[in-house]
Structure formats: structure tokens, C-alpha cells
Image (cartoon, grey):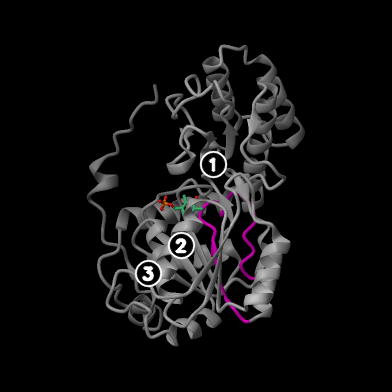
Amino acid sequence: MTEIPRPSADALLDQPPLSPAEVSALEQALGALLGTDNDIVLVQSEAIVALEAVAHSVAGPGIPALNVVTGPYGDGFGQWMRQAGSPVRDLVSPFDEVARVDDVVAAIRRDRPRVVSLVHAEAATGGTNDVAPILRAAREVGAVTVLDAVASIGAEPVLVAEWDIDLTVIGGQKGLAGPAGVSAVVVSPHAWAHIDANPGAPRSSVLSVLDWRDAWLRTDRSVIPGLPSWLESRALALAVERVRAEGLATVNARHAAAAAATRAGVHALGLELWQRGAGVAPVATAVRIPLGRREALQDGALGGILSAGVGVLKGQLLRVNHYGQAARPEPVNDALVRIAAAMSVNPGAALEAAAKIWGASGLPEN
Ligand SMILES: *Cc1c(COP(=O)(O)O)cnc(C)c1O
């Protein structure tokens, strides 16, 4: 049993209000983490709200969008753009495959959409899309690009500048081992021009990125608009600082090793990955539940860092959420032991296979 921590009133309640300097410092830390000088719009809510805000900001009547769907989040993003009035073409992959780059690039060149949106890593299905060539093709036709990097940031490189991404959405709660309550959008000048020209972009709304820009980013920054989440903002700053101190490359490497160790262990148990191709994610691994094993491996009843498939994926896969501080040997080994126990098999071979991966990774074995 994990002990539930009892934080002090000092830590949780009796803090001074968040200062403008702290907000600016958080933006700078996020910009440094992502290697970009572009504006950072903080969203006082979890990343799903930031995604909804972005969808409504870029979409509208007469703004055709091409939306790459490789999991539930991409599906939702397309629906929000449709709500906003855009004609949206969803390019849907089976959820056990990542996007087929050639097909997506061909569709972008043929349709010449004004918006191209896609998810980078899919925590829900354990896949990572090869986003660079898709973003390049989108740029070639002048489209505004939207990347949902919530599950990839911290777990693998998110190259905002090199890929020239217009709108990058991130959150703290996955690879950064931080809080879920404040998220961020990196906004390029090209994206601002597009959103400014969109008469439907939200104003006077919790979904408005323009409100935050005009009331904060383009001011002397002496007054923070509204009442920002003190605790979550400070927690996010702490999470980003911890990642910086460890080194983003090392944090990425921990995630890669955790994923590889999980895959090796799962194969040793005679199970298959959910992803059929090579596009497996460092953030989380999805394991296919074989027919006849539904009872044993059901619904995240297994505990630890294991969870059930959500929505249409329920009963079909088991997620190993080896992200953040769980991208380490102990939680991964614990997950393998739990899966082995549920299958009534000895975990020895799985643990041995996982140990080999950690050994070869050169990372500390704790
Ligand atoms: C986790 C995640 C999000 C954010 O979802 P929340 O409900 O805010 O936690 C968005 N996109 C992807 C791809 C994710 O994995």
C-alpha cells in the first residue's frame, strides 16, 4: 500500500499569491525546456481544456482542416473543430497503428487544408507518430499546424523550433512528473496571424488564447489577469526545474528504457503489444489482452502503474503507464510482476528480460 501523503497547511494553503515574476519565470522555463522563443500561453486547467481552446481558436466556417486521428484525443480534437464550423477531414488509422506518413502527406498535398492537427504520442494506445514529415508537408502548403504533445513532452524529444510547430499543447502530468491543473500552449507568430484573422476565435471566454495574450503577454506584466492556480503553477515550475536539473535528455532516456524494458518483459510473458507496427511510444506501453484472458487481465484491477483501456479500448488492452517518476525499474518490474501474477505464471523471465534492458541503458538501476 502506498501511503497517502499529508502535506502541511504551510505547503498547501498558507502561501503568498502567485506573483507576476513567477508566471514569467514559468513561461521562460517552459520555453527553455521546449527550445523556443515563441509565446507561451498558460491555461489554468488541464491540457484537455487547452486543446479545446486551440481547436476553437484555429477552426471556423471556411477554414478547412485535416485532422490525423490515431487515438481518442485526435478524434475529440476533430469534433471541436467541427463544432467551431470548420469542414474537417479526419484521417483515421486503426487505433492499434500509428499514422501512415505517406498517406497523410499525400492528403495534405491534395487537400491543401488551412489547419493540420495531430497527436504526437498516444498514452492511450502506446503509439508515437512520426510527426516531422507530416509537419513539413503541412508547412509546405501554408497550413497552421497543431501538435498535441501532452504525452510526449518529457518522454521523447518535442522539437518545437526544428519542426516549426505553430501550436504545441503540453501538460505536466505525464512525462514531466508534474501536476495536471495548469497546461500550456506554445504559439508561433504564424499561428497568431491565423487566429487574429479568424472571426470565430473565442473572446471573453475561458477558451480564449487571445484574451490571455492581450491581457498579459502584450502588457507590462504587472498584473496577472484573473486568479491563476497558485498551487498548480508552483508545482509545474517545480516539475520543470526537476527535469532541467536531471537533464531533459536523461529524462527522455529513462522513458525510452522503461518502454523497452516493458516491451521485453511483456514479450517474455508471451503477450503481444497493442501496437502492430514500429511506432511504439516511450511514454506508455499498451499490451494486447488475448482472447480468453479478459477475465484475468481485466480493467486495471491490477493496480500499480497499470490501467485499463478507456472507451472503445476497454477490455482490449492494458496500459503500462511508465511515465514521469514511474519511468524507473521498480515501477516497471512491479507492473510485470502484477501481470504475471494475473496470468498465474512465474515473472522470472520477464524480470530478467527487463533487467537486461536497464543494464544496457547505462542509466542508474533505481
Ligand atoms: C493525457 C493526454 C492529454 C491530456 O488529457 P487530460 O485529460 O488533460 O489529462 C491530451 N492528449 C494526449 C495525447 C494525452 O495522452
Distance from disc 2 to disc 3, alpha carbons, whole Å, reads 10 Å
Give x and y (percent) for residue 242. 52, 49
Q: Secondary structure at mark 2?
A: helix
The segment highlighted magenta reads 142-162
Image point (58%, 29%), residue name: 332
Q: Give the residue pinned by disc 3.
A: 83
> Looking at the picture, how far across and down is residue 74, in whole percent?
50, 58
At x 74%, y 27%, the residue is 356
Which numbered tag is attached to residue 323? 1
| Magenta stretch encompasses residue 285 | no
For the residues labelled 2 and 3, say whether their Cβ atoms are less than 8 Å apart: no
In the picture, measured across the screen, residue 320 lies left or right of residue 253, that is: left
| 138 to the left or right of 220 | right
Q: Nearer the viewer, residue 216 or 314?
A: 314
Residue sitting at x 31%, y 63%: 18
What secondary structure is marked by label 1? Answer: loop
Q: Is residue 38 above or below residue 25?
A: below
Q: How many marks?
A: 3
Mark earlier in primary sequence (1, 2): 2
Looking at the rendering, in which quadrant would you find the N terminus? top left
Structural crowding at the residue carrying mark 1, measured as other residues with C-alpha within 10 Å and reported as few (<14), some (14–19) or many (≥20)? many
Q: Dot 2, how many residues are within 10 Å of its Cα: few (below 14), some (14-19), or many (20+)?
A: many
The answer to whether 212 is drawn above or below residue 294 in the figure is below
Q: Nearer the viewer, mark 1 or mark 3?
A: 3
Mark number displayed over residue 350: none
At label 1, the amino acid type is Tyr
